[in-house]
Amino acid sequence: MRCLVVDDEPRLRRVLVRLLAGEGFTCAEAGSGVEALRELEKEPAPLVISDLRMPEMDGVTLLREIIMRWPETAVIVVTAVAEVESAVACLQMGALDYVAKPFHLDEVRARVSQALDKRRLITENRSYQQSLEDRVEAQARRIEELFLEGVHALVYALEAKDAYTRGHSMRVANYSVEIARALALDSDLIDTIALGSELHDVGKIGVSESVLHKAGKLTDAEYRHIMEHTVIGARILGPLMRDAPGALAIVRSHHERLDGSGSPDGLKGKQIPFEARLVSVADAFDAMTSVRPYRPSLAVNHAMRELEEGKGIQFDPDIVNAFLRAFQEGASLPIPTPQLQPLRLPMRVMEARRA
Ligand SMILES: [Fe+2]
């Protein structure tokens, strides 16, 4: 094992070097703190024995540097008997031991062996802690993956049952993200809105297929049954999305209307969560501009007029305005169905899950 002996007295240095060489160490020597740092930069050493009083750079400054730059290195300081206070200060800073001058060789031998034992324990402890941290990190990542896999399973189940809804959800997510950008929302809120809008109709898994695919006009009972998808979706996703209340609010409240006549809770105005008010504009626009078995699609201009007319009644006016800004008054509408993107968790959700 390599050892660096630092002392400005060549005689003392040689005594220590001879002793340590006899113990099997390969020794390097330095006559000052500055020289010692140069030696360590060339090749770090697991053990440094250093005098405290030296020209250029004293032992305390050297110790501080070593602890900062080579925390794995064990340092033993050599002090005069009168310097016990400095020795104690060195121990507090992280030196593993000290030897008082004049010293017995046996004492030095014992201190070196103890210091190396301590160093080994500290290193083992550190690597054990690191491996624990790595395992916790890996578990957190796995939990996150399981969560997303669970959500994906729901999305795929819905897709198998109702291909229209999946394409619709992806377009709504796109519209919603563009509205969010036009409103200069922060990126975490945008991610929440993207996740919530992709999942907003997941509750249709619980809606009967004959009603979902009915070509003719729905009866009142059938309409009420379809509208249950908000509550069903929130019930399915609730346990999975405790850390993403904004996304969950989109699932439950995207059919609320500003005037309080929406469902499922009849919320009014600002009682409706902001994220849900935003997605409801995107949702309505996409529903109007898509072809359904029971009706053709509306022209873009017509759908935009409906949004304008619904300001303050069904829709939040600021959000409708942001939609119009985002799509330059309709010039780039309607957007095509985007490629299937993997779902992403908002940063805040990931951090909450890790904590
Ligand atoms: Fe819906």
Image (spheres, grey):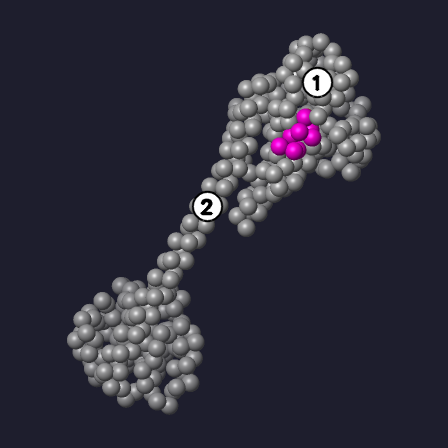
Q: Is 145 placed left or right of 213 in the picture?
A: left
Residue in the image at 77% along x and 20% along y: 306
Q: Is 168 placed left or right of 4 in the picture?
A: right
Q: Which mark is residue 139?
A: 2
Question: If the image is split into quadrants, where does the N terminus sit?
Answer: bottom left
Neighbor class of circle 2 (other Cα within 10 Å; few <14, some 14-19, many 20+) is few
Between 159 and 291, the one lying in front of the other is 159
Judged by depth in the image, the label closer to the viewer, 1 or 2, is: 2
Magenta region, residue range: 229-236
How far across and how far down the image is residue 34, in percent?
Answer: 33, 73
Q: CA distance from mark 1 to mark 2?
A: 44 Å
Above or below, 33 against 212 in this view is: below
Q: Is 165 placed left or right of 219 in the picture?
A: left
Residue in the image at 79% along x and 31% along y: 266
Is 148 in the magenta? no
Above or below, 157 against 296 in this view is: below
Q: Does residue 332 appear in the picture of this structure?
A: no
Above or below, 224 against 245 in this view is: above
Q: Is 326 placed left or right of 354 in the picture?
A: right
Amino acid on which the number 1 mark rests in the picture: Met
Above or below, 183 against 25 in this view is: above
Residue in the image at 58% along x and 45% along y: 348
Q: Does residue 155 appear in the picture of this structure?
A: yes
How far across and how far down the image is residue 178, in percent?
Answer: 64, 31
Q: SS for tag 2?
A: helix
Q: Which residue is mark 1?
A: 288
Q: Which mark is residue 322?
A: none
Q: SS for tag 1?
A: helix
Amino acid on which the number 2 mark rests in the picture: Gln
Q: Quadrant of residue 115?
A: bottom left
Q: Is mark 1 within 8 Å of ligand 1?
A: no
